[in-house]
Image (cartoon, rainbow, N blue to C red):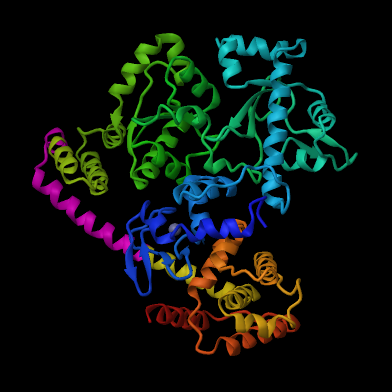
Amino acid sequence: MANFYSDELISEVIAANDIVDIASGYMKLQRSGNGYKGLCPFHSEKTPSFHISADKQLYHCFGCGVGGSSLQFIMNIENLDFVEALKFLADRAKISLPEENSDENNNEFYEKRQAIYKVNAAAAKYFNKTLFSDQGKIAQRYVSSRQLDSKTAVSFGLGYANPDIADCTEYLKAEGFSEEIILAAGLAKRSTKTNGLYDFFRDRLMFPIIDVRGNVIAFGGRILGDGVPKYLNSADTIVFNKSKTLYALNFAKHSCHDRIILCEGYMDVIALHKSGFTNAVATLGTALTEQHTKIISRYTKEVVLCYDSDGAGQKATAAAIELLKAAGVKTKVLTLPGAKDPDEYIKKMGASAFESLIFASENATLYKISKLKQQYNIDNIEEKIELTNKMAEIFAGIENTIEREFLMKEVAVQLDISFESIDAQVKLLMKNNAAKQAEKEFHDQSKKDKQRFTSENTEFMSECKLISLMFAHSAVYNDLNDKISDNFFKVKGCSELLKQLRSAKQKRVNIDIATAMSSVPPEYSDKLSYAILKEQPYTNPIKAATEIYNSILKNRTSPEKDINSPEELSKIIDMIKKQKNK
Ligand SMILES: [Zn+2]
């Protein structure tokens, strides 16, 4: 299974870390049946859908669908890979792990990640060398036109991808990297005409994207000639997910405790770091996502938004304010007088002027109010009424009573309206909002139940249930062992679990499902944990297993049945709800 650590050792580490214990370090848990539930730390919600089974040592969120063992919980919440999470848990339980020097039992997935880190690091080195060579003159001129010194270029690992069709690929192949890994890292693409590889980045200034552990996970490239797009990022790979990555967080993580400065692009971040603002990060050509805000909230309590002053930047600011608010991060907005971006501002006005802007940056609510005021003429009575109503909507979204009352009083004076009438309107809106939220949560849940039912109908659920029964009851295992071949399970996660169960049985050691699941990729553990935690206890496990086994065989020979009428569907949803409430 996973990497070179033995199954026994992994099992020991997992057994020494109770999942209830681990999870309660990150969230508040309450007892529910024979398990626990709480507000999910991986998505924002008001009613708890995160469940833990203490006896199975597994978790699953019925809201966002993540799930697995304590190891996967740590991988998810701490953003670690398998080995790092294992080390984290071993440390926590004071179990010492052997050095990483054996190569038996390699895990394909783990190996591939490591290979991609290596090929990316080699490519970064190659781009960097090219930048400082004769070939890199054009890029050097660009770098100095942006007033970046070579020290900054070196510390950010800047590089140059030359215009040749496959120079980088040829270099990497000569260094011993396979075409498969170069492609998997997104550094090259295969031509449909010639079937050969060509470089993904050409004639671009290169920005390596480095994760908080120091691995080069992807690249961004700025075009130097006339091509488009201006900025090009690596496509998502098994080590890189744009919506979860913040540029320069590897540097900022040491200095962002008080606040993070969030800006739009690579050049802004580099200009800020160069001027001493080492807590600046940026998203990678995408809007801020909920996943980004989760990561941010782990590092800091306050974000200063420093987006471009153009229309797109202002729109992005408004969206970011709402997302950061949902993640519970205090947000301020920095406005750049007389400059379009922080880079330009610092060049014109200097670093200390920028520092003053940070301290003068506006609380997100005040920012929203001042933006709103600009859109209305308060000498016109109709516009004034509309503005007051819009303001009331903003106030209704403020959870802090003191902040809300303070702002309402100020606006009442400014707009010459009584505090009581604004207050009454705000209270009414707050009541409506709460009702709407409850309705939305209910609606989302029914939608999910609907999707779930369709997936429960499939072989997927049956396979998960069957493998879970085989783990839980030796009698079931013994009963089915002869009938089930190594490739009986079509769900990859299930066949991986069977492999582990068989190997443990051969060695005459015990293995529980939480241990086995720890090395299954997340796309499977999310679903497996769902199937397993949803499963009802069986009075006769052998009989249940035989029925499931037979139904799998039967399904494989008959066409799938679909639900067609809405009436049929709502009956099924009701049935699931009833089951859930039992
Ligand atoms: Zn969740």
Give me the residue at 27% from left, 59% from top.
434
Give me the residue at 60% from left, 64% from top.
516
Which residue is at the front of the view, 442 or 272? 272
Please state the quadrant of the image where ligand 1 appears: bottom left
> Is residue 419 depicted above or below 307 in this figure?
below
Q: Is residue 578 visible?
A: yes
Q: Which residues are magenta?
A: 411-440
Quarter of the image where one finds residue 380: top left
Work out which quarter of the rendered image holds the C terminus and state it: bottom left
> x%, y% of residue 3?
67, 50
> Is residue 422 depicted above or below 500 in this figure?
above
Q: Is residue 414 magenta?
A: yes
Magenta stretch, overall SS: helix
Work out which quarter of the rendered image holds the N terminus and state it: bottom right
Quarter of the image where one finds residue 400: top left
Which residue is at the front of the view, 136 or 381? 136
Q: How many marks?
A: 0
> Is residue 524 depicted above or below 574 in this figure?
above
> x%, y% of residue 119?
72, 34
Give me the residue at 47% from left, 63% from top.
59
Toward the right, the furthest residue is 194
> Is residue 167 depicted above or below 467 in this figure?
above
Give me the residue at 68% from left, 26% from top.
124
> x%, y% of residue 137?
72, 10
Which residue is at the front of the view, 445 or 81? 81
Q: Is residue 232 visible?
A: no
> x%, y% of residue 207?
62, 26
Q: Is residue 185 magenta?
A: no
